[in-house]
Image (tube, rainbow, N blue to C red):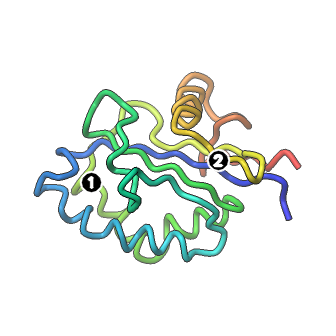
Amino acid sequence: MSSHHLAQINIARGRALIDDPIMVGFTEQLAALNALAEASPGFVWRLVDEAGGDATGIRAFTDPRLIVNLSMWTDVAALKAYVYRGQHGAAFRDRSQWFGAMDGPHLALWWIKAGTIPTVAEGKRRLELLAQLGPTAEAFTFRAEFAPPD
């Protein structure tokens, strides 16, 4: 068993606020996608807001259309399998219906000691590191992976 887990943050800017009818195609899938993540091999933890279902109520940025997703996985392969395959893969391919292009990185991955829960502030810092330095062991992407520190 690894002494580290993979933390990931991804952000997306909605074409409208999350409760706008434009976003319904996304919001209608959200509970099922979160349940699928939790049932996926390698899933460890995900951020939820006070309502407990998802993290769409968390305002981590000044732009109210920006939503944040923060989760932990056992390894990169497990997260990739969830992101690009099955129901989530289909939603991911359709994302331009609900989300616009981002300025700068929208995903950052990093290794975190098992048993530690990442924070949104830490995730934002990892996105900033990725924007400033490109992929490093401190903040990387699926295209430029780094092995865990073990």
Q: Residue at x 45, y 54 (%)?
A: 48
Q: Residue at x 71, y 60 (%)?
A: 75
Q: Secondary structure at mark 2?
A: loop
Q: Secondary structure at mark 1?
A: helix
Distance from Cα at disc 1 to Cα at disc 2: 30 Å
Badge number at residue 6: none
**On the picture, is 37 further left or further right than 74?**
left
Residue underneath mark 2: 117
Looking at the image, the residue that sits furthest to the left is 21
Q: Residue at x 23, y 54 (%)?
A: 98
Mark 1 residue crowding within 10 angstroms, few (<14) / some (14–19) / many (20+): few
**On the picture, is 78 further left or further right than 131?**
right
74 is higher (above) or lower (below) than 85: above
Which of the 4 image quadrants contains residue 72? bottom right
82 is higher (above) or lower (below) than 101: below
The mark that comes first in sequence, 1 or 2, is 1
Q: Measuring from the top left, give residue 8's x and y in whole percent.
A: 58, 49
Residue underneath mark 1: 96
**On the picture, is 98 further left or further right than 141?**
left
Nearest the viewer among 15 and 68 is: 68
